[in-house]
Image (spheres, rainbow, N blue to C red):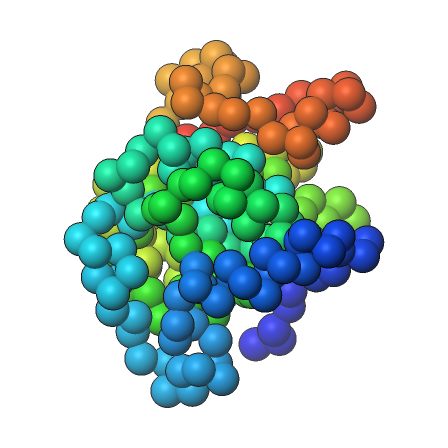
């Protein structure tokens, strides 16, 4: 199978000196060992208790600037969060927020979530978030989206039975593909009426990506699924 990235660039504008310090000083201590192929060429499963210490594990795929995962971690101290993001600037922004807030229950993987799904034990993730993912708007690039069988199959495996999976996007066609593919991958859409996808979750913190969508008059959609 051709190996396709579902994300775009991994570096943006030059990092500020403080952000460079966050990456060099804080990222090593917050990273989870054994995810990359260099660290774990045999792809043996992670020992979740080595970093979750018996707490429920929640996963955010592509945390952007880190607003959402920090807010969730502050409000759910009994949960261990694992955020995955290949974009270096986004990781630096998250690390700055972790320093600022002092939140203690976030671990970080700066890289491809597919490497993580290789080594997470089956059923180890109890809740997951995919918020404003790269839309890949061109038709020929739709197969690069996260909500394809190529990615959803392994993703389903690492989620526990009954796990909640939240997806937010402002792209109409991404909504269509999400509803089509996620349900086929073994998830139930929990919406009972239009307000269930028009209104954000009660614990939602609007991100900078959402604010940009609203400024550009695009409509956010909030979809909640449950692993069957």
Residue 46 in the image: x percent, y percent? 30, 70
Residue nearest the viewer, comparing 29 with 7: 29
Residue at 75 percent across and 52 percent down: it is: 16
Can residue 41 be spotted in the picture? Answer: yes
Depicted 86 relative to depicted 40: above or below: above
Looking at this view, is 199 or 84 the one in front? 84
Q: Is residue 119 left or right of residue 95?
A: left
**The N terminus lies in quadrant:** bottom right
- Residue 172 is drawn in which quadrant? top right
* Residue 95 x, y percent position in the rendering: 55, 50
Q: How many labels sit on residues?
A: 0
Q: Tell which of 164 and 10 is nearer to you.
A: 10
> Is residue 7 at all visible to an observer of this figure?
no
Q: Residue at x 50, y 20 (%)?
A: 200
Q: Quadrant of residue 42?
A: bottom left
Q: Residue at x 37, y 80 (%)?
A: 43
**Compared with residue 45, is residue 204 higher up or lower down, i.e. above or below?**
above
- 32 vs 172: above or below: below
Which residue is found at the position 74% from the left and 28% from the top?
212
For the view shown, which residue lies furthest in the bottom direction? 42
**In x, y percent, where is residue 211?**
69, 25
Is 192 in front, or is 128? 128
Furthest-left residue in this view: 54
Question: Where is residue 8 drawn, in percent x and y?
Answer: 72, 57
In this rendering, position of residue 208 left or right of residue 179: right
In which quadrant will I find the C terminus?
top left
């Amino acid at each position: 199978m051709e190996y396709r990235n579902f994300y775009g660039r991994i570096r943006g504008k030059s990092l500020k000196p403080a952000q460079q310090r966050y990456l060099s000083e804080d990222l090593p201590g917050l990273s989870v060992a054994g995810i990359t192929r260099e660290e774990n060429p045999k792809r043996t499963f992670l020992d979740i208790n080595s970093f979750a210490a018996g707490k429920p594990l929640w996963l955010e795929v592509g945390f952007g600037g880190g607003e959402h995962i920090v807010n969730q971690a502050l409000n759910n101290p009994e949960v261990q969060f694992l955020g995955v993001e290949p974009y270096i600037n986004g990781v630096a922004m998250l690390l700055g927020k972790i320093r600022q807030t002092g939140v203690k229950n976030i671990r970080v993987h700066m890289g491809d979530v597919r490497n993580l799904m290789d080594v997470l034990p089956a059923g180890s993730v109890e809740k997951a978030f995919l918020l404003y993912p790269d839309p890949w708007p061109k038709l020929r690039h739709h197969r690069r989206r996260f909500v394809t069988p190529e990615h959803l199959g392994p993703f389903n495996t690492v989620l526990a039975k009954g796990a909640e999976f939240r997806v937010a996007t402002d792209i109409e066609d991404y909504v269509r593909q999400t509803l089509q593919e996620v349900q086929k991958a073994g998830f139930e859409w929990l919406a009972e009426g239009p307000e269930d996808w028009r209104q954000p979750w009660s614990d939602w913190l609007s991100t900078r990506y959402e604010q940009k969508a609203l400024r550009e008059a695009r409509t956010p959609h909030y979809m909640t699924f449950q692993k069957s």
